[in-house]
Image (cartoon, coloured by chain):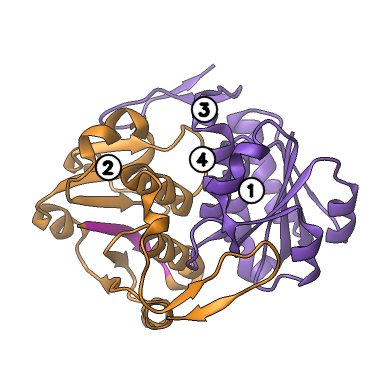
Chain colours: A purple, B orange
């Protein structure tokens, strides 16, 4: 089971970024996203709409307490940060375990670094939480996440143009 | 040489997403990003500021014509789209070549599918152009992009907390 925790969502500024983080979580094989910050029904609706159309059981929900999400989680807690140790060094020991993957917003509470079991970096340069999450899940599943079929619409791969198939 | 073309930027709506795409391009080893759509000096400034602080020679620029960027490019042109063929099937033959990697905005001109040498998918589910670009460059460089040092600030990997070192 893989849960993603996205911190400090702000509906105006972060709407599309948090949407991308949630879509990456879903497309790369996570089961659920929980976000803190300001509750955003439009964000939740847009993700549920994708799930209805494209399939699977991915869940999104809001929480007022990032701390309780972390303390209540029974598996390993991984915080993605450019300040951590390289993800490729630690991933072999995490594979197959239940993971809570935490991705920050603009500011990350310093306690998070202590509460996480692992602070892992996807490179040591600034980039994107959507990309960091994608690489983390890609490493966890070793690329096999793209081969798992979800219910709902599927794409027929095509060299030119779009082919959409309803299962 | 790897160039990224980001289509149809809209300053209000896309600012942070295009910023993330550009930061991913830089952090994952591309040399340059060109974007079309509305020119956005604030976007360009924010990327140049990252380059000054964190190092390297990454360039960002605006173009009025996506077609001329594609036709003028001498290497292989790769369009990332969920409707393409799986990236892992084609990447072996692209490695080591000059690439123009095209990532769409909200709407992608249908001609692009024909002008690209390859339409490649990173999974066949909707997610994020930042994540798709990250996976594409990660596959191209086979994870080695994180080991290349840029000039400027570097992070000392740390199990707990932040350590920033000025080179």
Foreground disc of the pair 2, 3: 3
Task: State whether the magenta stretch is mostly helix, strand or loop.
Answer: strand
Q: Nearer the viewer, residue A158 or A162?
A: A158
Sequence-wise, the earlier of marks 4 and 2 is: 2
Where is residue A60? Give x, y as percent.
Answer: 75, 45
Q: Residue at (12%, 55%) from the top-left corner?
A: B73
Instruction: Count the numbered circles shown.
Output: 4
Q: Label 3 neighbourhood size at 10 Å, few (<14), some (14-19), many (20+)?
A: some
Toward the top, the furthest residue is A167
Which mark, by number, is residue B110?
2
Q: From the image, tell me which residue sits under label 1.
A: A22
Question: Secondary structure under badge 3?
Answer: helix
Which residue was labeled with disc 4? B126
Q: Does residue A129 appear left or right of residue A60 in this picture?
A: left
Give the residue pinned by disc 3. A144
Distance between mark 4 and mark 2 Cα atoms: 18 Å
Is label 1 on the same chain as label 2? Answer: no
Q: Taking A26 as reference, is B39 above or below it?
A: below
Q: Do pointers 4 and 1 mark residues of a single chain?
A: no
State how far apart marks 3 and 4 are (Cα): 17 Å
């Amino acid at each position: 089971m893989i849960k993603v925790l996205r911190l400090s969502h702000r509906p105006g500024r972060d709407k599309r970024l948090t949407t991308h983080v949630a879509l990456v979580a879903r497309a790369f094989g996570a089961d659920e996203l929980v976000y803190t910050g300001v509750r955003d029904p439009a964000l939740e609706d847009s993700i549920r709409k994708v799930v209805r159309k494209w399939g699977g059981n991915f869940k999104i929900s809001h929480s007022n307490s990032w701390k309780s999400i972390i303390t209540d989680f029974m598996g390993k807690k991984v915080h993605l940060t450019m300040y951590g140790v390289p993800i490729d060094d630690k991933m072999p020991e995490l594979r197959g375990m239940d993971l809570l993957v935490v991705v920050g917003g603009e500011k990350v509470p310093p306690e998070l670094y202590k509460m996480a079991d692992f602070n892992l970096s996807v490179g040591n340069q600034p980039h994107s939480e959507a990309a960091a999450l994608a690489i983390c899940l890609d490493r966890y599943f070793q690329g096999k996440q793209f081969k798992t079929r979800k219910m709902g619409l599927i794409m027929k791969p095509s060299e030119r143009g779009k082919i959409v198939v309803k299962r």
